[in-house]
Image (cartoon, rainbow, N blue to C red):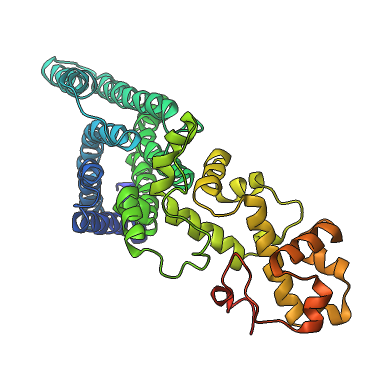
Amino acid sequence: MNKLFFLPIFINSFLILSGIIGLFTCVLFLIIKKSNLVLNIYFIVPLFFFSSKQIIVGFLLINTNSSFNKLNDTANASILLLPILYTYLKKLTNLDYSFSWKETTKNIFLPISIIIFIELLLFIIPIKSASIKEYLIQLNHLLFASYYAYLSFRLLSKTLWKPEKNRLSIKYELILIQWSKFIYSIVLIGPLKFIYIIFILGNSNSGLYIYYFQIIASLCCILICLKIISSPELLFGMKILEKKINDLKYPEIILDSIWNKTPNRIPNSVQDKKLEKTIKNSFFIYVKEIEHLVFEEDFFLKSNLNIDDLAYKLCIPKNRLNYFFKYHCTISFTDFKNTIRIIEAKKLIDNGFLIKNTLSSLSKRVGFSSYDPFYRSFKGYTGENPLNYMANGIASRDLPIIQKNKFNHKIPN
C-alpha cells in the first residue's frame, strides 16, 4: 500500500492551513488594492494559485492514496509562476519600472515558450525508458527554475541587497531587504526540489520525499503571509503609509516649539538640495522617533552621546540627521541634547534629588561628563545656577526655548 496513505492527517491539514492563510492574505490585498495596486497584482496571482493548490492537494491526500501523480503534476506546473514572482521583484526594487517588450520577451515569454516546447517534444518523441523520460522532464524543469533563481539573485544583488541606497527610509529599506529574502526563498524552492529529485532521489519512486517539499513550501507561505499581515509597510505600501501618517499631523507632538516642518532657510549646498525632498516626506516620522527616544528611553541622557549614536539608533544616515537639525530644528543637535538634559535635571531637583546627592552626581545622572558644562548649560537655560534654582523653588518658570506645559508628564508642577 502507498506510504502516502499513512501520512498523518495533521500534515495534510498543514497544507490546507497554509492555503487558507494565503487566500486570506489575498483578500487583504484586494481590500487595499487601491493603495498598493502595482505590487499587489504581481504578488496576488502566484499567491492565489499556490494557496488554492495547497488546499486542493491537502484534501486530495486526505481522501485518496492515489493522487500523488496529480500532486506532482501540479507541483511541476507551479514553476510557471516563477516569471510572475520575478516580475514582482522587478517592481519591488524599482516602483517606477516600466516593462519593455524586448525585456518581457527575453525574461518571460521566451523561457516559458522553451520549457513548454521541450515538454511537448518529450511527450511526442517515443522514449522507451520511462525513467530516462522522467529524468529529462525534471532536468528541463531544473534549468527553468534555476534560470529564474539566477535572474532574481542578480536583480536583488544589484539593487536591494546593495548597501546605502537613496530610499525614503532606511528602516523601510531594511524591511524590504528582509521581505525580498522571504520571496527569494520561495524562488529557490524550485531548483532545490529538482536537484533533490534528480541527483539525490534518483530512480526512487517514493513520492513521500517529494511530498515533503510541499510542506516546506507551505511553511514558507505561512511565514510570508504572517510577515505581510504584521507589516503595514508591505500591506499598504510605504508612500501610502507615510501619507496617512503625515495626514494625522501628529497632534501629540511634544516639542512643537523647536521643530519646523518647512526648512528654516533655503538649502545652499548640492547635497542639501538632494536631501530636501527626502527629509520633507519623512519629517513627522523623524520627529516622532526622536521624541520617543527623549521621553520613553531617556536616550539623550547617555554620556558622550553624539549624532553618530543617534543615527545608529534610528537606522538613519548621519547626513540626513545633520540636515534635519540644520534646517528643521530651531537649535543645533548639541543644544537640543543639552536642553533635554537640563529639563531632566530640573525635574530631579524639583523632586528633591539634591537633598541626598551632590551637583556632580546630578550632572552625571543627566549625561554631562563633568560639572562645569552642566553648570553653564543649566544657567544658560534657566537663568540661574542649580543651587539657587533649588533654593528659590522655581518649579513653574518656563525655559526660554521649550514651553514647560509640553513636559507636564515629565516634570511635575
Q: Residue furthest left?
A: 124
Query: Up-down: is 62 above or below 385?
Result: above
What residue appears at the point 85 percent right and 58 percent down from the top-left corner? Answer: 372
Q: Can I make out residue 6 in this image?
A: no
Q: Can I make out residue 245 in this image?
A: yes
As drawn, is 389 to the left or to the right of 41? right
Residue 120 coordinates in the image, percent (x, y): 13, 20
As drawn, is 148 to the left or to the right of 159? left
Quarter of the image where one finds residue 79: top left
Front in this rendered view, residue 194 or 209: 194
Residue 124 coordinates in the image, percent (x, y): 10, 18
Residue 105 coordinates in the image, percent (x, y): 17, 20
**Numbered-mark total:** 0
What residue appears at the point 23 percent right and 46 percent down from the top-left corner? Answer: 40
As drawn, is 215 to the left or to the right of 357? left
Quarter of the image where one finds residue 39: top left
Which quarter of the rendering shows the C terminus? bottom right
Query: Up-down: is 395 above or below 288?
Result: below
